[in-house]
Amino acid sequence: MCGIVGCIGVEKPQKYLMEGLKELEYRGYDSAGIAIVDNKELKIIKAVGKLKNLERKLDQVKFENPKLGIGHTRWATHGKPTEINAHPHSGQFSAVVHNGIIENYQEIKKFLEEKNINFVSQTDTEVIVKLFEYYCNGDPFEAFKKTIEKIEGAYAILLITKKEPEKIFFAKKGSPLIVAKNSKGIYFASSDAPLIGYAKHAHYLEDGEYGYVSENEIHIYKKNLIISPEFKDLPTDKESAKKQGFRFYMEKEIYEQFDVLKETVLGRNTEDGIKFDELDKKFFEGVSNIIISACGTSYHAGLVGKYLIERNAKIRVDVEVASELRYRNPLLTKDTLFIVISQSGETADTLETLKMAKKAGLKTLALCNVDNSSIVREADKTILLRAGIEKGVASTKAFATQVMTLWMLSDYLADKNEFEAINEAIEATKVDNSLHEKIKRLSKRYLHGHGFFFIGRDIFYPLALEGALKLKEISYIHAEGYPAGEMKHGPIALADPELFVVALLSKNILYEKTKSNIEELVARDATVLTVSSEFIEMTDDYVKIKKTNHPMVEFFEMMVITQLLALEVAVRMGNDVDMPRNLAKSVTVE
């Protein structure tokens, strides 16, 4: 979740780079940096934290005749948010910025280290510039081509070098990259927003396209064939451009979950099992039970974690609502690991329970999306979620990364290897356009009842809670999540044609039991939408998921469906999806 900019042939390139990075800061602000060719010298300025820190350092640098430059704002994926790990990464005579994942970076790094080439960062990106310089014995463009042929994964790359001080090399595969041109120069960015006001038309690079730009020319290749740029009109509204064509940030963030989860598991889900650079097994010595403390969506993720950790690792887990726990005088024994979950790292109730656990002498672990936040600073250990900035108030991708991280933690504690299942679950979050269209059409039937029940069993019960929360947050329609087996203990009294039920029916966990619970509601004439791989004829509506042997794969596909349903119902109600009434993104009050 990083932002990239570049320019050539522009007076004061550092001005465009900084303005462009400000437009991309929502994509990450752990660190930022720029690299500029100035009188054939390479000047690199980097800073940790928000862009104002980089701006202060840049003000101290004197440029003589700057011709071109590249810039980057980073959301840390692997490698801590330090100045060393910040982009641009450099070698002896070159610098690179990169968004994406180099999947075979360890293999390349080992190859280069055997050639006595040293690395200074913890990132995958550094291998790009070091490999380029290894190949660069003659024509730099040939060296660049060899480099991108060698690397595997997803990437958007801009590279500059003193050996070709009047060119920027670029490549795109899987991560967005745009090139635009006006009468003064050529510009790069990873989304539209930085380009607006500088150019009116842009070429949106396709996967597999690469090349270089000079002061007035764009050279694009694909499979060694020259490609003519296809210029399209840029948007005129910067805020709209940041949404990348989506109607709302929340919609964009639902679609981003596939890429975000790939970053969440990067370097952690390996063919040899789960690995956390942040943890070692000694940290868990003496732990016989776990308390998870969280609020709202994070609390629901914690409930999923309870099922997974108890099932896989055989460790007792209690999940607590932080606002209740902090005032309850709970029994906190030193054989307890205290886990807190927070998107922002500033959730007041959760932070206070963490302080309470620390005071009681418990080991503490934070699952958090924002490094250097209050919760991260307070906890003994932290696993960063790598969700990127989440602008929609109703959390989607942060919840996805919380659940995925808890799943990996359960496997880590159990020494269990579910490499393929985790990858399959990530694939399940890829939004299918026909599915989204079906949910759009279904949503018009679910607007005017007296409320919703979301029902499920086992891990699908907390997903039912989360589905109900998403709907009520943005549609303002009353919704509740229930364990499906609890319907007959009171709630079924509300069943009638105006009660809408979303039934999460797993083929892998308690299928027949849950099916019977659905039939009980159908018999009372409730309006039921079933989400399952198995068609249930008697229910009113049905959304099909893929058949799988693993319940967590079902979980992640159902998660996306409940998010899309909430979104489309809210859109039909005419609500502001990104900023629902009465809510805030980071709850820093009691």
Image (spheres, rainbow, N blue to C red):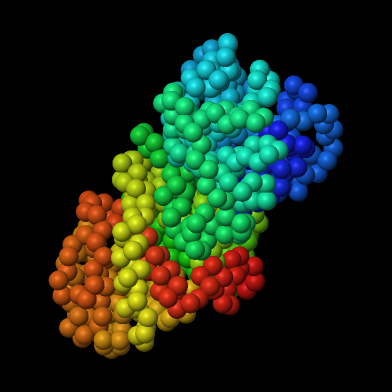
**Quarter of the rendering occupied by the C terminus:** bottom right
Identify the residue at image location x=35%, y=34%.
Answer: 271
Give the answer, above or below, for where 38 lies relative to 464: above
Say if residue 370 shows up in the picture. Answer: no
- Give the x, y percent position of residue 141: 55, 20
Say if residue 217 shows up in the picture. Answer: yes
- Give the x, y percent position of residue 433: 34, 57
Q: Nearer the viewer, residue 121 or 11?
A: 11
Q: Nearer the viewer, residue 67 or 284?
A: 67
Q: Is residue 538 left or right of residue 274?
A: left
Identify the residue at image location x=51%, y=30%.
Answer: 220
- Give the x, y percent position of residue 371: 62, 49
Identify the residue at image location x=58%, y=18%.
Answer: 140
Name the image quarter holding residue 507.
bottom left
Q: Nearer the viewer, residue 67 or 490?
A: 67
Badge count: 0
Give the answer, above or below, for where 436 lies relative to 455: above
Identify the residue at image location x=75%, y=38%.
Answer: 14
- Give the x, y percent position of residue 363: 55, 52
| Residue sticking out furthest to the front | 183
Q: Is residue 73 left or right of residue 13?
A: left
Give the answer, above or below, for where 258 lies relative to 5: below
Name the image quarter holding residue 505.
bottom left
